[in-house]
Image (cartoon, rainbow, N blue to C red):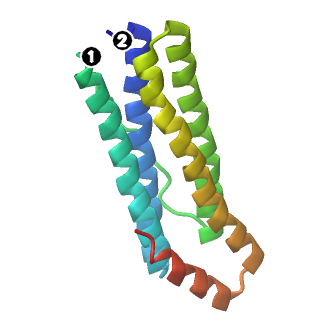
Amino acid sequence: MISSNLQAAINRQINAELWSAYLYLSMSMDAQDKGYPGIAHWFYVQWKEEQAHAEKFAKYLTDRKAKVYLEEIGGVQQEWDSPLEMFQEAMAHERKVTKLIYQLMDITVADRDYTSESFIRWFVDEQVEEEKSVDEVLTAMERVDDDPHAMLFIDHELGKRK
């Protein structure tokens, strides 16, 4: 049985993951509107990944006979000035999510809930990949310095994400 504290924290994390999905879908739509189909695709894939994270948390709670409480998802920004700004915000957001995951880990350790600790460890490791993925794109975009040909290349490459 998981503690009520951990159950509440995981429920908050489900909401955070769904909000993240909503943010990335908004970024995808804005990139598409601005003529960046590859960037739109990259954020669309990220949207699906965040939904999968929320689903994984929800399944864990139900597997542990804990209740899932879905809350209202708050609104997200609708437009960005540039793809660079999108990825800067994505990086800041992923760092925030990393802190949230660490807080979940802190609870499992305090509860001595080794099953939940093992489950949360997957997300700790996943956040390393999440931050790395965004950082690689962000670094590339910062290097191109608004060169339209280079941005076309980046957009094309991001369209290959699976």
The answer to whether any part of residue 68 appears in the image is no
Q: What's the residue at 36%, 11% (across, down)?
A: 2
> Which percent across, then down, holds residue 143?
76, 75
Q: What's the residue at 33%, 29% (across, down)?
A: 71
- Please give the count of numbered marks on the rendered protein: 2
Instruction: Tell which circle, 2 or 1, labels the residue nearer the N-terminal end.
Output: 2
Q: Which mark is residue 144?
A: none
Give the image quarter of residue 99: top right
**Residues at circles 2 and 1 in contact by the CB criterion of under 8 Å:** yes
Depth check, front residue: 131 or 109: 109
The answer to whether any part of residue 63 appears in the image is yes
Give the image quarter of residue 73: top left
Q: Is residue 23 above or below residue 16?
A: below
Q: Which mark is residue 66?
A: 1
In-image side of 18 versus 80 (left or right): left
Q: Which residue type does callout 2 highlight?
A: Ile
Q: Which residue type does callout 1 highlight?
A: Ala
Q: Is residue 161 above or below residue 63?
A: below
Kindly give the residue lying farthest to the bottom in the view shown: 149
Helix or strand or loop: what does disc 2 sit on? Answer: loop
Crowding around mark 2 (Cα neighbors within 10 Å: few <14, some 14 to 19, many 20+) is: some
Q: What's the residue at 66%, 86% (across, down)?
A: 150
Depth check, front residue: 76 or 96: 96
- Disc 2 versus disc 1: distance between alpha carbons? 7 Å
Helix or strand or loop: what does disc 1 sit on? Answer: loop
The residue that mark 2 highlights is 2
> Which percent across, then down, holds residue 79?
52, 63
In-image side of 132 versus 59 (left or right): right
Q: Quadrant of the N terminus?
A: top left
> Which percent across, then down, holds residue 59?
26, 31
Q: Quadrant of the C terminus?
A: bottom left
